[in-house]
Image (cartoon, helix red, strand yellow):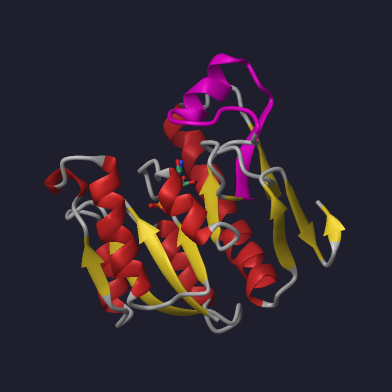
Amino acid sequence: MNGVVLISGGGSNLQSIIDNADEIDLSIQCVISNKPSAYGLKRAAQANIQNCIIDHQLFDSRQDFDVALMSAIDEYQPEIVILAGFMRILSDKFINKYQGKVLNIHPSLLPKYPGLNTHQKAIDANDSVHGASVHFVTKMLDGGPVIAQKQVEINTGDSAKTLAERVLRQEHVLFPKVIHWYTRGRLKLLNDTTATLDGQVI
Ligand code: GAR
């Protein structure tokens, strides 16, 4: 299946997707970053994957940025759009256009801790477990149906950094697995709150 990957940063999730691409039946047509400095762009180049920058700072509004992003994506007509550490909120227009095709990985056990600083929030709340979720993207920020999660224990003395590192390692296992479910046609988004795996509501 053909896909486009959107990133904003280091791209370690992108790397795990690249490394597993054959196994998960994914052909990455292009990697798009909203940040010119994103290290993930180098990872794409090293893997001979087309990559481009659409710098959100060059646009007056979220809508204008999204129009440019959509037109870049549409050059490839991808069947899946993968948000791998993409840190921009997408407009309703974008979501409507690609609804059911967009998967995001988020570093918390959703519905806990949508948004930013999830690791610190879990530590501050004295949680014993934290983790990562993969979900379909809908109009509600980090609120689309969760497909799968990986849990990580929070250790005494964990900082947001040490915890984030352990969560990331799990993300690298979780995301390719879920993408593979999608590329094999096993995953569907039914509506804003419901997804199915092999026809069963998740
Ligand atoms: C990952 O932890 C990912 O879950 C998170 O950003 C990090 C990107 O790391 N995504 C979000 O917070 C989205 N709301 P990476 O660039 O090394 O893959």
Q: Position of residue 147 (x, y in %)?
A: 70, 52
Mark yes or no: residue 2 visible.
yes
Task: Return the residue found at the far top.
Answer: 125
Q: Is residue 187 above or below residue 140?
A: below
Give percent across and percent down for residue 52: 23, 68
Residue 61, image x and y in percent? Answer: 22, 40
- Name the residue at 39% across, 41% down: 89
Quadrant position of the N terminus in the picture:
bottom right
Total marks in image: 0
| Identity of the residue drawn at 29% across and 45% down | 63
- Asked if the magenta segment contains residue 1, the reply would be no
Q: Is residue 181 left or right of residue 18?
A: right
Question: Residue visible at 44% across and 28% down?
Answer: 117
Quick check: 29 left or right of 34?
Answer: right
Q: Which residues are magenta?
A: 111-135
**Toward the viewer: 46 or 3?**
3
Front in this rendered view, residue 32 or 63: 63
Q: Position of residue 25 (x, y in %)?
A: 59, 82
Which of 144/152 is in front?
144
Above-or-below relation of 98 to 48: above
Is 189 on the left-hand or right-hand side of 23? right
